[in-house]
Amino acid sequence: MDTEQKLRKVGLSEDEYKNIKDILSREPNDLELELIGVMWSEHCSYKSTRPLLRTFPSKGKYVLQGQGENAGVVDMGEGWGFAFKVESHNHPSAVAPFQGAATGVGGIIRDIIAMGARPCVSMDGLFFGDAALRKTQNLAKGIVEGIGAYGNAVGVPIVGGKTFYSSCYNDNPLVNAFSAGYVRLDKMASSQTAKPGDLAVLLGSKTGRDGIAGASFASRELEDDAKASKPQIQIGDPFEEKLLIECCMDLLQKDLIASMQDMGAAGILSSSSEIAEKSGCGVDIIVEKIPLREADMLPWEIFLSESQERMLLIVEKEKLDPVFALAKHYGLDCAVVGTMTDSGRYRVYKNDVLLADLPTSILGDTPEIIREAKCPEDLSERQRLDLSKLRSDDLAGDLLKMLSCPNGHKKDAIWVQYDSMVQLHTIAGNGEPAAVVEVPDTNRACVLTMEAEPYKCHTDPYKGAVETMALSLRGIWLTGAEALGMTNCLNFASPEYPEKFYELKEAIRGLADTCRALDCPVVSGNVSLYNETAAGQIYPTPLVVTAGLVVDRNNIIRSGRTQQGDIIYVVGKTEGSLAASRYQDHKSGKPLGATVAPDFENEKKFRDRAIKTAELQLARSGRVAAGGGLAVAFANEAIASEIGMRISISPEDSPESLLFSEGGARAVYSVAPEKSAEFEALWSDFSLTRAGIAGGSDLVWDNIFTLSVDRLRDAFAGSVGENK
């Protein structure tokens, strides 16, 4: 195999190869080239995005551990930390839906374990193709079953998420897995605390050929023949993961671990080299010490395998015996596979023969690429919207269709496959706008929202990302929670196209500006690029999950609690934008037009008043106006509360805009009559509209439509309910 073929195999360019030779002052051998190639892949190195990611605000008064660790950790008070992160498993889920999604859940759970936290929450962000296609239905079925099977068996509740359908995901579905857990602050673990002389210990499953070079696989576009990629998909065992969780928690409780790292992308190689680099050490790995499922594995296969349910522990020599004893107690394989050194070198030995000798910096401190960003030539066309084409002669029918469409209807066919109550900490789970879980042994609660706005990011990456982040924060604030931090998964096409890199750059700028303006640090995240096939590229899909804290969980405002006689209010402007909205997609089938302009000062005013509303318990129920605008917000509240409403707001521009426009800080509240004066006083210097009153069995919008709650419910269940 000549040099060009070798470079193509490991995913390196000629310029990168020249750089490697300059660093080493020699030619790398074949094993070294494999090791460097995977660590320099986009998936492992973030070489295209690191300069952009540094623009994220990372510090905040609640941040205990920010970017650079397995997961971010924020302070929940009373001695508790909350570790959380979201990651992608897009390519694996496209070619092996069940196992790809299942191992995505397993992998993100291990990131939480690596921080010393007990995993207690999972969520999923799922982006599927055209819902009418058999291919989409089969992919979705396998992915959802994989998530449910792994999450239910491992005993971590799945409490919420987001599901979105668009033809841009026909060949490249996205599976973004979120997990979180609580950790006592004095028991937090780290990947940066190894010392020379400590032992590298592999705990968990034996190493096999499944998942070999998965990081490189995720750093290129999907092949037309997806079957050719199946050998690179990991196979998960949730019962082994459950044992791994309990063993790691026990080891941490007994202070037997000096450092710990999940074996995710690039397996043993990435976990051992990252610990060495972050701790300022070197490491010597002994190949024959690694427990294998297949005896004939070559060294490069062993190091690049992504076999599941494995953790790398760094253990002081005097604590090795109790570590082995606990591993035996839990029935887990455990082996010393190397030693931390003061050499600053990453060395691989087999039977005393040195196979690879690299500076740890070449694996951990990888080069960056400065990509060209070019505004797409069709961006102005994407932002052009002819509002006259959105006029309707059947607004009631439009509302029913929006409630029943794939992006509008109830997702209970997915939720029923998930156990949301295991561990008994869930306060609000699937089907509610925000997930809420208890903080153990306290009266506090953590609130979580997951949001993505692909249509808005397609038509204006900057404004779309701003709206995505702001929408996630509004959901946190409305419950009464203060935002603690955000994690994100940046799903984009190839950065090698200047137009696509522009979308990525602008979206990151939008997220960063919003987080900075609204005091929400970014504590962790993941970048997933090359989400494309020969048939096309996905829309820009930055997904965010925001964590918030409620000090007294008795004061949380939830949705679906409107009662007879409650006064219905809209806070914020009654009209946003029809651009790139669910209504506009319903009418034209193609997202067009730029969403609302950012207004961070208005967002802050909304934040302060929403949190105070919950603290003073001035509202009975509330929900943020999001997809589908006010009409869908009222309809969803009526369905969840099982009560009608009479709405008396007249349009300023058009009835379509009043009912269905999106964007900006807006919410719907129901308020008991005896608290209305105090509520109105609190919101008096903000846009406030007394919209109507709750009661009866119909949603009535004066001079526009009348629909029974039963008919709305039928539509939300996936049918427009023509007979009611």
Image (spheres, rainbow, N blue to C red):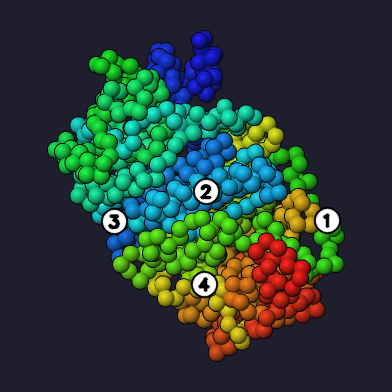
Residue tagged 1:
386
Q: CA–CA distance between discs 1 and 3?
A: 55 Å
Q: CA–CA distance between discs 3 and 2?
A: 35 Å
Q: CA–CA distance between discs 2 and 1?
A: 41 Å
2 vs 1, front mark: 2
Q: In front: 511, or 537?
A: 537
Q: In front: 249, or 229?
A: 229
Q: CA–CA distance between discs 2 and 4?
A: 29 Å
Q: Earlier in the sequence, mark 2 or mark 1?
A: 2
Q: CA–CA distance between discs 4 and 1?
A: 37 Å
Q: Which mark is residue 185?
A: 3
Q: Which mark is residue 558?
A: 4
What amino acid is found at the position of numbered circle 2 in the picture?
A: Glu
Element marked by disc 1: loop
What amino acid is found at the position of numbered circle 4 in the picture?
A: Arg
Element marked by disc 2: helix
On the image, the x and y values in percent for residue 539 come to 66, 44
Please give the name of the residue rendered at 63% of the width and 72% of the height, measured from the top-left corner.
639
Q: Earlier in the sequence, mark 1 or mark 3?
A: 3
Element marked by disc 3: helix
| Relative side of 615 to 189, left or right | right
Q: Earlier in the sequence, mark 3 or mark 2?
A: 2
What amino acid is found at the position of numbered circle 3 in the picture?
A: Leu
Picture layout, residue 461 above or below residue 705: above
Please give the name of the residue rendered at 35% of the width and 57% of the height, measured from the top-left corner.
182
Q: CA–CA distance between discs 3 and 4?
A: 30 Å
Please give the name of the residue rendered at 33% of the width and 32% of the height, measured from the top-left corner.
206
Q: Which mark is residue 145?
A: 2
Picture layout, residue 343 above or below residue 686: above
